[in-house]
Image (cartoon, rainbow, N blue to C red):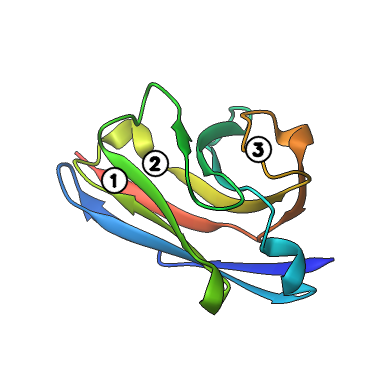
Amino acid sequence: QVHLVDSGGGLVQTGGSLTLSCAASGRTFAMYTSAMAWFRQAPGKEREFVGSISGRGSSTYYADSVKGRFTVSRDTAKNMVYLQMNSLKPEDTALYYCARGRTSIGGSSSAEYADWGQGTQVTVSS
């Protein structure tokens, strides 16, 4: 099992930027070929896919709602995954989670992910 710790959330104004970080520990060798993803969950809503990066970092995949504004990246040597968020909107307000995929392909279903961070809160004020 890989232990994931999310950080970097906070309060930001509409149009602002934040970078979330996800630090991995434990069986980190499992990260080397695993896809990594970010999900989010707003109050009263189901958890939704935000973006993912493939096991080797060669491809990324984003939800339509964040495409062009958010960027997922990874530094495998440091066991870190990042979510750069630009042009933030109030509807981006949610608890954000990173997750480690069961395979190297970063799909959008939460069932494809084995390990989860505890979440970091992002609040965008209007």
Q: Position of residue 24 (x, y in %)?
A: 64, 72
Image side of residue 61 versus residue 11, left or right: right
Question: Of residues 28 and 88, which is closer to you in this image?
Answer: 28
Which residue is painted at 56% across and 53% down in the image?
56
Nearest the eye: 48 or 79: 79
Residue wearing tag 3 = 105
Mark 1, Cα crowd under 10 Å, few <14 / some 14-19 / many 20+, is: some
- Name the residue beneath numbered marker 2: 93
Q: Residue at left 32%, top 42%?
A: 70
Nearest to viewer (mark 1 / mark 3):
3
- Amino acid type of the residue tagged 1 in the rendering: Val
Of residue 124 and residue 7, the one placed in the foreground of this image is: 7
- Above or below, 11 against 70 in this view is below
Q: Secondary structure at mark 3?
A: loop
The kind of residue on which mark 2 rests is Thr
Please identify the quadrant where the N terminus is shown: bottom right
- Give the side of residue 94 with respect to residue 68, left or right: right
Note whether 117 is above or below 7 in the view shown. above
Mark 2–mark 3 contact, CB under 8 Å? no
First reached walking from the N terminus: tag 2 or tag 3: 2
**Label placed on residue 124:** 1
Q: Amino acid at mark 3?
A: Ile
Marks 1 and 3 sit apart, C-alpha to C-alpha, by 30 Å
Q: Position of residue 26 (x, y in %)?
A: 78, 78
Where on the picture, by quarter, is residue 89? top left
Q: Secondary structure at mark 2?
A: loop
Callout in the foreground (2, 3)? 3
The tag earlier along the polypeptide, 1 or 3, is: 3
